[in-house]
Amino acid sequence: MTATRSTRQRDVITRVLHDAEGPLGVADVLDRARTDLPALGVATVYRTLKLLTDQGRIHPVTLDGETLYEASGKGHHHHFACTRCQRVFTLHTCPVALPSGTVYPGGFIVEAHEVTLYGQCPDCAQAS
């Protein structure tokens, strides 16, 4: 495998995802990256997201049928989706005590779990 060269676009998109409070959609990545790179195009964002995913530096998160992206290496975590502003946040604590290997009635053996909580983020709750 050949090494992938670093570009300003890749560096900015990687930083945007690393600094985000939760996973971001393509449009959000594009908007935030355009702060540093006003001429950045959506095709470059798509190509970069695919490359970073293939490299394992980011991973996709599917919420309500939409693919979002977040930096890898955050460990076990879940998400909170605000029903007012539509932002998605990373929760750093697990709201479910469900260890791998738990057996549910009927013989279902848990290997992993994903939880998304829905409601209002602190900003939207305060504005209500």
Image (spheres, helix red, strand yellow):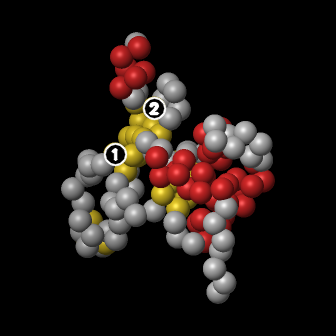
The answer to whether the residues at label 1 and label 2 have Cβ atoms under 8 Å apart is no
Q: Tell me the amino acid under the disc marked 2.
A: Cys
Q: Looking at the picture, how far across and down is residue 117, in whole percent?
A: 38, 40
Q: Residues within 10 Å of mark 1 (few under 14, many from 20)?
A: some
Q: Looking at the picture, how far across and down is residue 25, in whole percent?
A: 60, 45
Residue 82 — which label? Answer: 2
Q: Quadrant of residue 105?
A: bottom left
Q: Residues within 10 Å of mark 2 (few under 14, many from 20)?
A: some
Residue at the extreme bottom of the image, as rendered? 1
Please state which of residues 8 and 66 is positioned toward the viewer in this rendering.
8
Chain-order first, disc 1 or disc 2: 2
Question: From the image, which quarter does the N terminus lie in?
Answer: bottom right
Residue 91 — which label? Answer: 1
Q: Secondary structure at mark 1?
A: strand
Residue at the extreme top of the image, as rendered? 128
Q: Looking at the picture, how far across and down is residue 124, in whole percent?
A: 42, 21
Drawn side of residue 64 relative to residue 41, left or right: left
The answer to whether residue 42 is above or below residue 31 is below
Q: Looking at the picture, how far across and down is residue 19, in whole percent?
A: 46, 46
Please state which of residues 108 and 119 is positioned toward the viewer in this rendering.
119
Which residue corresponds to the image point at 41% horizontal and 14% vertical from the top-left? Answer: 127
Which residue corresponds to the image point at 34% horizontal and 54% vertical from the top-left? Answer: 77
Q: Secondary structure at mark 2?
A: strand
Q: Tell me the amino acid under the disc marked 1.
A: Leu
